[in-house]
Amino acid sequence: MSLRRKLKGKKPPEGWDLIEKAIEDFELKLKDAVNEEHEGKRKTELNWKIHRLHWEKNRYIYDLMFVRKAMSKELYEWLVREKVADGALIAKWRKPGYEILCSMLAIQRGNHNFGTTSHCRVPLRARAAQQRITPDVQTGCISCASGDGKFGGPVWWNTPIDEPKEEDRDGQEGPSKKRSAEEAEIDDDEDIPDEVRARLEALKRR
């Protein structure tokens, strides 16, 4: 159902006309995401874009209401009442530790093994290597833990990130940076083509 049809016959509070176009744009993007081609994607991946757009729409409302204070309480409560805004998610953002929570699904213990929350709630540096940059299967969020955010929001499956370094995660120095004798010989060998030398250098940096 389109936003206009959903709100037809309902008189909005003052200020709705100033944000109506932006909200409609979000709703159209959500509709396109729902109707997106499914071929070549896992079932869980189909919802990732929807969750991110839902987060972005509600963050827009949150910023207007609680950060910029440019929205009236009356308009905000009307948006929540008409289910244009996700009141539960926005309320969580106002609590310490949940400032960039990706979705309410991430903290619903019944949705996860052993009655825990999603691993996207665990800071990147505190994770085991196999989970370090793994998206949550339901939301596509890699991390929405405080301190891990990128660009003011969670680290999503398609957000460019740098993996934590060994010394940052363990509090210890990583592998020795001393070069082996063999590596030194490779560097000193002038007969190695530049292309091969570049590949070797790239491998050593991994």
Image: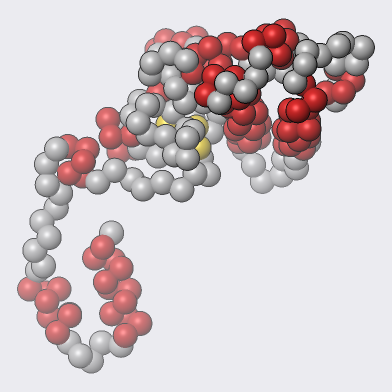
- Answer left or right for 1 relative to 141: right
Kindly tell me whether residue 138 is visible in this rendering. no
- The percent coordinates of residue 106 (x first, y second) are 49, 20
Above or below 197: residue 120: above
Name the residue at the bottom extreme: 191
- Answer left or right for 74 relative to 65: right
Specify the quadrant that holds the N terminus.
top right
* Residue at the spot 75% in from the left edge and 20% down from the top edge: 15
Q: Closer to the camera, 11 or 2?
A: 11
- Answer left or right for 106 relative to 205: right
Q: Closer to the camera, 104 or 178?
A: 104
- Answer left or right for 84 relative to 149: right
* Residue at the spot 30% in from the left edge and 88% down from the top edge: 193
Among the 4 quarters of the image, the one containing residue 104: top right
Specify the quadrant that holds the C terminus.
bottom left
* Residue at the spot 29% in from the left edge and 43% down from the top edge: 164
- The percent coordinates of residue 31 (x first, y second) are 78, 32
- The percent coordinates of residue 157 (x first, y second) are 51, 40
Above or below 178: residue 135: above
Kindly tell me whether residue 177 is visible in this rendering. yes
Among the 4 quarters of the image, the one containing residue 64: top right
Above or below 112: residue 146: below
- The percent coordinates of residue 91 (x first, y second) are 53, 12
Tally of marks: 0
The coloring applied to the image is secondary structure
Among the 4 quarters of the image, the one containing residue 46: top right
* Residue at the spot 65% in from the left edge and 19% down from the top edge: 71
